[in-house]
Image (cartoon, grey):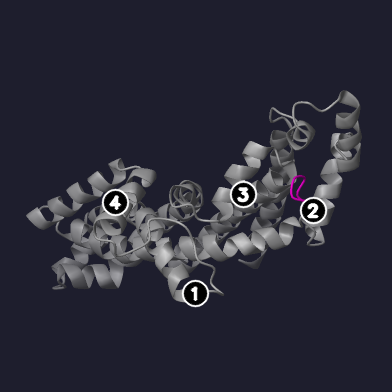
């Protein structure tokens, strides 16, 4: 088992290297010229060339790639081409908004999807199961940004219970900062919960059709007892797989939600940096999000061995 883990760690490192090359290549073929963005359209060619030289944009691509990766390995994420501020502290500052948003959304999604999915799966032939399935299908059909706008209209504009947008810094007003994240967290969490509920329901329905569940029922166990003792662990494999995908989907959804609610997080920073052609910030943010996706997939793969002993014994 230890050898298998080392192999997967090696594949994770290879994947990160390949991802860094791809991210660097893609961001450097984006249309536009950051020097022209900084100096404006009236800048002379000589001024543009001088600024490109100062920013190091005239160096060969492979040199800029090595410098970028080497800097990240030494916790130096470079300097923004536009604001001339260090990117590392800027990302940490934005994480104080995006991290709580993602965590709260994941908690909401799990708290709703797991019990609702199990109930819908156990009662899939009953009215209650059909109602949960219908509601989850409706949630899947709702885009994240529309859910955010709907929640803002109800709870912020009509009921005036929560702020419709903006963010108060944690150091200034922790309660106000938490209130600012309630609606965007709900918008993300409810949509993700709808998707996850469908997969939990399907996993529970499938596991009830397995022979070992029928055998357990024949020995006198109730449906819930059979599921609790034998079925939930078996059903957890596909659920964990989808959960890993859902967690990475939160990162994409956060980019949309942060712009809907005007939150100063990583998503809004990425959106602005792409528009301003700030390559260093774009590269660092995309690489950070890609690394999170790869690490989550790595952890999901390891979790299989904890859930299902057969995977451990076959490794």
Residue that badge 2 annotates: 78
**Foreground tag (1 vs 2):** 1
Near mark 3 (Cα within 10 A), the count class, few <14, some 14-19 or many ≥20, is: some
Q: Which residue is mark 4?
A: 153
What is the span of residues highlighted in magenta in the rendered image? 79-84
Of marks 2 and 4, the one in the foreground: 4
Q: Are marks 2 and 4 in contact (CB under 8 Å)?
A: no
| x 28%, y 61%: residue | 160
How would you rate the neighbour count of disc 2 (Cα within 10 Å): few for under 14, some for 14-19, many for 20 or more? Answer: some
Q: Of marks 2 and 4, which one's residue comes earlier in the chain?
A: 2
Q: Earlier in the sequence, mark 1 or mark 2?
A: 2
User: Badge 1 is on which residue?
Assistant: 173
Query: Which mark is first along the chain, 4 or 1?
Result: 4
Q: Position of residue 32 (x, y in %)?
A: 71, 28
Residue 290: numbered disc: 3
Identify the residue shown where x is 41% and y is 61%.
Answer: 105
Report the Cα–Cα distance between label 2 and label 4.
40 Å
Mark 1 closeness class: few <14, some 14–19, many ≥20 residues within 10 Å: few
- Return the residue nearer the eye: 234 or 97: 97
């Amino acid at each position: 088992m230890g050898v298998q883990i080392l192999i997967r760690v090696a594949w994770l490192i290879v994947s990160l290297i390949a991802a860094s090359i791809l991210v660097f290549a893609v961001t450097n073929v984006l249309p536009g010229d950051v020097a022209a963005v900084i100096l404006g359209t009236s800048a002379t060619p000589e001024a543009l060339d001088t600024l490109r030289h100062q920013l190091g944009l005239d160096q060969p691509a492979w040199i800029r790639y090595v410098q970028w990766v080497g800097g990240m390995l030494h916790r130096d994420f470079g300097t923004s081409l536009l604001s001339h501020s260090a990117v590392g502290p800027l990302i940490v500052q934005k994480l104080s908004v995006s991290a709580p948003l993602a965590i709260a959304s994941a908690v909401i999604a799990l708290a709703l999807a797991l019990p609702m999915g199990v109930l819908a799966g156990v009662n899939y032939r009953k009215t209650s199961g059909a109602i949960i399935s219908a509601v989850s299908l409706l949630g899947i059909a709702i885009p994240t940004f529309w859910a955010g706008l709907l929640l803002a209209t109800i709870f912020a504009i009509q009921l005036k219970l929560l702020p419709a947008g903006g963010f108060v810094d944690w150091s200034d007003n922790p309660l106000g900062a938490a209130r600012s994240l309630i609606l965007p967290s709900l918008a993300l969490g409810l949509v993700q919960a709808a998707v996850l509920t469908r997969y939990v329901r399907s996993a529970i329905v499938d596991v009830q059709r397995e022979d070992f569940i029928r055998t357990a029922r024949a020995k006198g166990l109730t449906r819930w007892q059979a599921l609790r003792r034998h079925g939930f662990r078996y059903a957890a494999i596909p659920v964990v797989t989808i959960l890993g995908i859902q967690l990475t989907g939160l990162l994409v959804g956060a980019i949309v939600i942060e712009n809907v609610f005007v939150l100063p997080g990583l998503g809004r920073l990425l959106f602005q940096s792409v528009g301003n052609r700030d390559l260093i910030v774009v590269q660092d943010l995309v690489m950070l999000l890609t690394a999170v996706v790869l690490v989550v997939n790595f952890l999901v793969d390891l979790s299989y061995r904890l859930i299902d002993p057969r995977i451990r014994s076959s490794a």
